[in-house]
C-alpha cells in the first residue's frame, strides 16, 4: 500500500492539487535550509481534531511557534477530556431552528457538524483553570492565556479525564516543547468569557492576571528578532529564516504577520528580514475588501513579504488540505 506522500505525489499534479504539493515541498525545503515555521490557526481546527497530525509536526520540530484563536487553544483541551461526550450531527445543514434549540437545551454547543458538551468539556476545564487563575491572582503573578493552560496540563490535574490518546493533542505536544504560542483576542473565547465573568464577580481581583494582546505582540517582536538572528546564516534580509503557514484568515493570521512591518516602520529596525515563506489555506476567495481573501502579492505592498518569497494560496477546506500537507512534510 502506498504511503500518503506517495499517493499525493502520484495524483496531486495539477491545478489546486499541484499547489498543495508545491506548498508542501517548499515547506520542506525551507526547513532543510535551517529555517523555522510559524503556524497560524483560525476557524475551529482543534474541534476538527487537527491535533492528529499537528501534534506530530510539533514533536518533530516542523512547527516552531503558533498563533491561534482562543477557541483553538481551548478546544484541543476540551476534546482531550471530553471526546466521548461529543455529538456529531451528519445532517447539520438540514437542522431546523427547533432542532438547534433542542441542542442548546441539551447543553450541546454546535460547531458545524460537531457539538461540544458544556458540562463534560467546558465546565471541567473551568474548574482546573480557575484554580490556576486564582493562585496567580493571589500571588500577584501574571501569565499569558496559553501559559495558564500549560500549567494545567503539566500539573496532571486533568490526566484522569483523558479520553483520547495524549499523543493526538497538539496542546500537550506544545506544552512538552514549551512551544511559543500567541493568542490575540483571547477574550473572544469561552475561557476568556469565563475569566471576564470571574473578574466581574470579583472572584479574580486583578483583571490583568491574564496578560494582554499588546503584550503578546511585544513578545512576538522579541521572538521574531531573536529567531531571525539565530537561524539567519543562510538567509537574506529579503527572504528570512521564518516561514508563515496560515490556516484560515482573521486575527490569527492578521495579528502576527504584521510584526515585520511594525519592526521596520514603527521601531525603525533596518536589519530584520521579511517572512521567508508564505502559504495560506482559505475558502475565502479574493473579493473587494476581504482581507482574508487577499492574494499573497498584496502583502508585498505592506512590507510583509518580498517579491522573491515563495508564496502559495490554496483555496480549499483546511480540514482536508492541512493534514495532507503535514503528512507530506512528515513523509507519512
Image (spheres, helix red, strand yellow):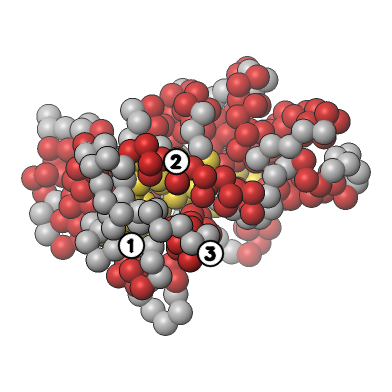
Mark closer to the chain start, 3 or 1: 3
**Element type at marker 1?**
loop
> What is the crowding at mark 2: few (fewer than 14 residues within 10 Å), some, or many (at least 20)?
few
Element under disc 3: helix
- Measure the alpha-carbon separation of dots 2 and 1: 19 Å
**Residue under the image location 23 percent in, 42 percent down:** 234
Q: Position of residue 23 (x, y in %)?
A: 23, 52
* Disc 3 to disc 1: CB gap under 8 Å: no
Q: Residue furthest right?
A: 202
Q: What residue would you read off at disc 2?
A: 226
Q: Secondary structure at mark 2?
A: helix
Residue drawn at (38%, 44%), measured in percent from left and top? 228
Above or below residue 111? Residue 226 is above
State the residue position of label 3: 266
Q: Nearer the viewer, mark 2 or mark 1?
A: 2
Determine the residue positioned at 70% across, 44% down: 211
Q: Quadrant of residue 293?
A: bottom left
Q: Between 103 and 254, which is closer to the camera in this rendering?
A: 254
Residue 280: mark: none
What is the distance, in whole Å, between disc 3 and disc 1 at their CAs?
Answer: 17 Å
Local packing at callout 3 (Cα closer than 10 Å; few below 14, some 14-19, many 20+) is: few
Where's the C terminus, which quadrant?
Answer: top left
Residue 299 pos. (x, y %): 36, 68
Amino acid at each position: 500500500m502506498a504511503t500518503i506522500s506517495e499517493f499525493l505525489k502520484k495524483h496531486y499534479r495539477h491545478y489546486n492539487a499541484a499547489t498543495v504539493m508545491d506548498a508542501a515541498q517548499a515547506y520542506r525545503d525551507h526547513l532543510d535550509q535551517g529555517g523555522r515555521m510559524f503556524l497560524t490557526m483560525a476557524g475551529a481546527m482543534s474541534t476538527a481534531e487537527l491535533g492528529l497530525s499537528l501534534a506530530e509536526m510539533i514533536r518533530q520540530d516542523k512547527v516552531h511557534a503558533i498563533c491561534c484563536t482562543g477557541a483553538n487553544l481551548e478546544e484541543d483541551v476540551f476534546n482531550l477530556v471530553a471526546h466521548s461526550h461529543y455529538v456529531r450531527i451528519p445532517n447539520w445543514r438540514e437542522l431546523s431552528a427547533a432542532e438547534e434549540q433542542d441542542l442548546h437545551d441539551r447543553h450541546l454547543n454546535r460547531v458545524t457538524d460537531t457539538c461540544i458538551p458544556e458540562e463534560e468539556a467546558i465546565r471541567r476545564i473551568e474548574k482546573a483553570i480557575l484554580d490556576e487563575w486564582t493562585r496567580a491572582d493571589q500571588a500577584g503573578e501574571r501569565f499569558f492565556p496559553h501559559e495558564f493552560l500549560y500549567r494545567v496540563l503539566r500539573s496532571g490535574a486533568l490526566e484522569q479525564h483523558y479520553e483520547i490518546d495524549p499523543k493526538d493533542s497538539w496542546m500537550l505536544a506544545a506544552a512538552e516543547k514549551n512551544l511559543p504560542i500567541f493568542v490575540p483576542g483571547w477574550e473572544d473565547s469561552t475561557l476568556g468569557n469565563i475569566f471576564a465573568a470571574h473578574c466581574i464577580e470579583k472572584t479574580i481581583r486583578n483583571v490583568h492576571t491574564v496578560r494582554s494582546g499588546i503584550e503578546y505582540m511585544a513578545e512576538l517582536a522579541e521572538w521574531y528578532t531573536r529567531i531571525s538572528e539565530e537561524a539567519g546564516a543562510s538567509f537574506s534580509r529579503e527572504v528570512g529564516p521564518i516561514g508563515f503557514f496560515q490556516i484560515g484568515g482573521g486575527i490569527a493570521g492578521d495579528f502576527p504577520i504584521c510584526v515585520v512591518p511594525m519592526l521596520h516602520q514603527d521601531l525603525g529596525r533596518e536589519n530584520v528580514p521579511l517572512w521567508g515563506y508564505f502559504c495560506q489555506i482559505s475558502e475565502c476567495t479574493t473579493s473587494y475588501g476581504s482581507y482574508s481573501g487577499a492574494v499573497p502579492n498584496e502583502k508585498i505592498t505592506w512590507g510583509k513579504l518580498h517579491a522573491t518569497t515563495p508564496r502559495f494560496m490554496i483555496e480549499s477546506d483546511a480540514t482536508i488540505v492541512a493534514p495532507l500537507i503535514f503528512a507530506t512534510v512528515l513523509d507519512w
